[in-house]
Image (cartoon, rainbow, N blue to C red):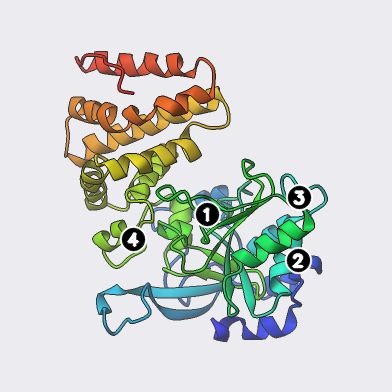
């Protein structure tokens, strides 16, 4: 990565988001998007140029370096973990989008404070870096500016979470660290500054905390200091454009086991499917369903399901929650049937026993939501010749 961005670091000031964008000169020298020296198209073979243009894929993406990539520091001890290559790009349109947000987006709950102001605090600390990560970059390659911009933090001088917490308290800003679901203690692998319930809060994880993305499309990084776009697996951009769910580890078992909340990656798979994403092949679908049947049926799995319901599914408003619940339920049951692991009746009954059974307290967030959720559940059971019994 130093080979790719060393020159850029010498040219760009620390407060990059405050300066005029340097993307103009890079764009003038940019070439047609490619992955490896022009050998492989940026988009999937099934995508024609008009489809790519319609998807809003960022133009003028140029490859700067291709480096070996492994998810473990000791690759010699576990050579099977050497996945592929890490690609480093210059992407002027992504750079312009990111820095526009940093300059203009106000942190929810802190009037007058922009996202870039907090980034500056980290960069000016010294020996520290800030990366935009995950879903914001994934959506950017499909032409969408996301509401939710997450950051990864790296520092040679220790964890940046307590530093940012202290700074926020000194400035009178609302600051929050999530509590561990098992111990109730505050977590040092996450910090949110601003209104913790709002999407446009400023939130970040330290690098190495296991929050670097669950699928290849969610592992993209943008280095705010150097302007480098990093694709750690070499497949993130392709999968973002093609709406593909591909795990980012050497093997499926390793990927499933490296999960802070057991089963959360599996649940997120079904949630992404409900939004139009697909697995790269049928084998991956079968592995997902097989692992879900085992893990999500445990007491630990039910805790994970409850966290997902609270944070992702039943929130915002009653109408939004009702819509998301139906989409998620249909996606999960359909994937189970497609995998060949269960008939539709069996999949419906399993869902009622192990997922719908966790609905209870979450449905109380909105008056009348429980009755509205019960109706489609009853109809679903009736269609399969199954008997209704409130599962929560």
Question: What mark, if any, has residue 186 been given in the picture?
Answer: 1
The residue carrying pointer 1 sits among few (fewer than 14), some (14 to 19) or many (20 or more) residues within 10 Å by Cα, namely some
Query: Nearer the observer, disc 2 or disc 4?
Result: 4
* Mark with earlier residue (1, 4): 1
Please say if the residues under marks 1 and 2 sit with CB atoms less than 8 Å apart: no
Q: Nearer the viewer, residue 275 or 92?
A: 275
Q: Is residue 333 above or below residue 212?
A: above
Q: How much space separates mark 3 and mark 4, taking CA atoms?
A: 34 Å
Q: How much space separates mark 2 and mark 3, taking CA atoms?
A: 14 Å
The residue positioned 16% from the left and 39% from the top of the image is: 341
Q: Secondary structure at mark 3?
A: loop
The residue positioned 45% from the left and 57% from the top of the image is: 217
Q: Image check: 21 left or right of 199?
A: right
Q: Which residue is mark 4?
A: 258
Q: Image check: 163 left or right of 310?
A: right
Q: Secondary structure at mark 2?
A: helix
């Amino acid at each position: 990565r130093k080979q790719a961005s060393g020159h850029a670091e010498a040219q760009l000031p620390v407060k990059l988001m405050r300066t005029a964008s340097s993307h103009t000169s890079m764009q003038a020298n940019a070439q047609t998007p490619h992955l490896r020296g022009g050998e492989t198209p940026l988009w999937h073979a099934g995508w024609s140029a008009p489809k790519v243009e319609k998807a809003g894929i960022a133009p003028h993406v140029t490859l700067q370096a291709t480096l070996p990539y492994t998810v473990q520091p000791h690759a010699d001890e576990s050579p099977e973990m050497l996945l592929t290559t890490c690609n480093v790009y210059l992407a002027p349109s992504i750079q312009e989008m990111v820095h526009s947000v940093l300059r203009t987006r106000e942190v929810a709950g802190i009037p007058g404070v922009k996202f870039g102001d907090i980034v500056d605090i980290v960069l000016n600390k010294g020996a520290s870096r800030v990366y935009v990560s995950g879903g914001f970059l994934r959506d950017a390659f499909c032409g969408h500016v996301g509401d939710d911009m997450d950051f990864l933090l790296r520092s040679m001088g220790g964890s940046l979470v307590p530093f940012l917490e202290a700074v926020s308290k000194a400035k009178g800003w609302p600051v929050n660290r999530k509590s561990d679901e098992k111990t109730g203690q505050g977590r040092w692998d996450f910090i949110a500054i601003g209104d913790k319930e709002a999407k446009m809060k400023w939130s970040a994880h330290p690098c190495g905390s296991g929050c670097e993305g669950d699928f290849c499309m969610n592992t993209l990084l943008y280095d705010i200091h150097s302007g480098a776009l990093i694709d750690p697996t070499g497949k993130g951009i392709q999968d973002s454009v093609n709406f593909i769910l591909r795990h980012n580890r050497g093997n499926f078992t390793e990927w499933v086991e490296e999960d802070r909340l057991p089963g959360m990656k599996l649940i997120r798979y079904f949630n992404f499917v409900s939004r139009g994403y697909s697995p790269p092949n049928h084998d991956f679908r079968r592995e997902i369903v097989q692992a879900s049947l085992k893990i999500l049926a445990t007491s630990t799995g039910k805790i994970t399901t409850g966290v997902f319901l609270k944070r992702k599914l039943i929130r915002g408003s009653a109408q939004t929650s009702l819509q998301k619940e139906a989409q998620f339920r249909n996606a999960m049951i359909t994937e189970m049937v497609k995998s060949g692991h269960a008939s539709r009746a069996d999949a419906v009954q399993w869902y009622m026993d192990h997922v719908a059974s966790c609905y209870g307290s979450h449905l109380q967030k909105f008056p009348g939501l429980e009755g509205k959720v019960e109706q489609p559940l009853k109809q679903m059971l009736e269609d399969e010749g199954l008997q209704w019994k409130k599962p929560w």
